Image (tube, rainbow, N blue to C red):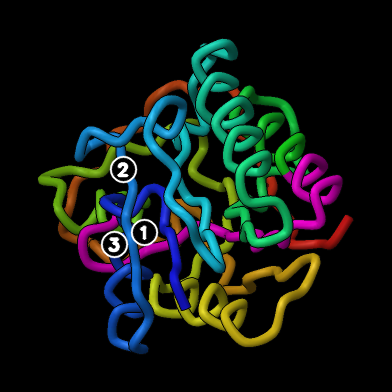
Amino acid sequence: MKIVVTGSAGFIGRNLYVRLIGMGHDVVGLDIREGNDILTCDLPDADLVFHLAAQTDATSADAEADARTNIMGLLRVLKRYGKAVVFASSSMVNYPVSPYAISKRAGEGYASIHGASVVRLCNIYGQGGHSVIEKFEEAAYLRIFGTGHQRRTYAPVERAVDLFCRETMERRALRVLDGETWSVCEIADRYPDKRRVHLPARDFDPVEAPQLMAV
């Protein structure tokens, strides 16, 4: 198939891009890091579109900047490709208290209106990633915001790519990526020799793990 991957230079996007190429598909990557802003760039013809381009800072309070990319960018893609779109959402939709979470929840609604598919992801980790797992692995000391008892669900990037690739064969309205649930302190326990520094809790940081329930 002719496939477009938006956000193709991001962590999940580049792994998905490489996998799709390996499967024999004709893949076009679009990413702002390479001069292709989803709000203005040309959108080529495609049989299938994986829309991963997004503002990904879940703690950002800049609702307007978030909405420009995560809502207006998505709407432009949906207008161009309709039901050929697979939208990368987040388990944070179940805790819509931040601009990021609200935009992802709205995105699922807009995807549904256009007959597009949704893949709802938990926290993704792996080489080149930027979850707390990679941050703790690389850090000289461990910065823990709040108590550290916040629980999140994590899955390796290979499993996320597997889930997206199922959409090349069988389209579904919603797929939900499961994983393992750990607290920040449980992840920190893997590095007993590293000093811990506790900092104030961040805004928009839910205490409980966002559940991967369908809505």
Secondary structure under the numbered disc 3 in the rendered image: helix
x and y, in percent, of residue 42 in the image: 39, 37
* Residue 82: x %, y % from top left: 70, 51
Task: Say few, some or many: other residues with alpha carbon within 10 Å of mark 2 (under 14 / 14 to 19 / 20 or more).
Answer: many
Please tell me whether residue 106 is drawn above or below residue 3 in the rendered image: above
Using the numbered discs, state the Cα–Cα distance from disc 1 to disc 3 in whole angstroms.
Answer: 4 Å
Specify the segment rendered in magenta: 108-129
Query: What's the residue type where badge 1 is placed?
Result: Gly
Kindly identify which residue carries mark 1.
Answer: 13
Residue 111, disc: none
Q: Residue sitting at 73 percent across and 58 percent down?
A: 83
Please give left or right for residue 142 compared with residue 199 in the image: left
Residue neighbourhood size for the residue with mark 1, other residues' Cα within 10 Å, grouped as few (<14), some (14–19), many (≥20): many
Q: Are marks 1 and 2 in contact (CB under 8 Å)?
A: yes
The residue carrying mark 2 is 31
Left-right relation of 194 to 170: left
